[in-house]
Amino acid sequence: MDLMAIRSVLRLGDPRLRQAALPVDDLGDPRLAPLIVDLQHTMDAHKGAGLAAPQIGVPLRVVLFGGNGPNPRYPDAPAIPRTVLINPVLTPLGYERDGGWEGCLSVPGLRGRVARWRRLHYTGVDADGQPIDRTVEGFHARVVQHECDHLDGVLFPDRLSDPAAFGFIPELEAAGLIPAVPG
Ligand code: NI
């Protein structure tokens, strides 16, 4: 039987979310594989678009995002391949930024509008130590920027384009600011 380890997700206000995470020095560290399994199970249990290790209380530079098919919370966005990204390095391409609504498992029930770099180059290594080197744009670029912010103790409410473009999901839906998401 698979030992599902759904970890609790730290919420805004927990000081551990504000720490800078440490690089993974040793890809052979035996704690790494169970961490990645826990990230997968926890993200899937919450139907998240992504999850960073600090959100489950592990201060390492490891993020997980994407999955098979569109995320139910973002039905119009193109699918992002499931990616474990260790020691990520992000480089914006160009100067264009896009505004978009974001949520976060550490900020449950809320959404806010955040400007992110439209195009992005990112590198890192995957769970097998293989290099990842991608140029992406749009929602994929947004998700990577959001998740990697967690590694520096930054959460999306820190980056609101407008303090008024932030609130609880039912109220934002009722105001017509965000589309109603099925389920
Ligand atoms: Ni988040």
Image (cartoon, rainbow, N blue to C red):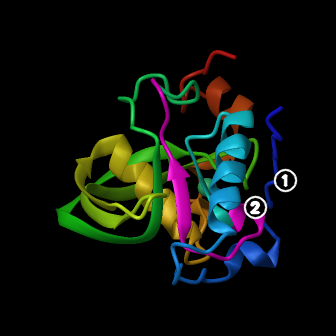
Query: 63 or 92, which lies in front?
Result: 63
Residue 161 in sight: no
Q: Residue at x 57, y 24 (%)?
A: 72
All told, the count of numbered labels is: 2
**Which residue in the protein does label 2 denote?**
56
Kindly identify the amino acid type of the residue bearing the numbered disc 1: Ser
The magenta segment is 54-69
Are circles 2 and 1 on residues that touch, CB within 8 Å? yes
Image coordinates for residue 93, horizontal then vertical, percent? 18, 64
Q: Secondary structure at mark 2?
A: helix
- Name the secondary structure under disc 1: loop
Tell me the residue at 81%/70% (across/down). Answer: 13
Ligand 1 position by quadrant: bottom right
Position in image of residue 67 (x %, y %): 49, 34
Q: Please name whichever residue, 170 or 147, is drawn nearer the observer in this view of the structure.
A: 147
The label shown at residue 8 is: 1
Most distant residue in the left direction: 94
Query: 153 or 25, which lies in front?
Result: 25
Residue pictured at 43% horizontal, 58% vertical = 126
Q: In the image, is residue 176 above or below residue 64?
A: above
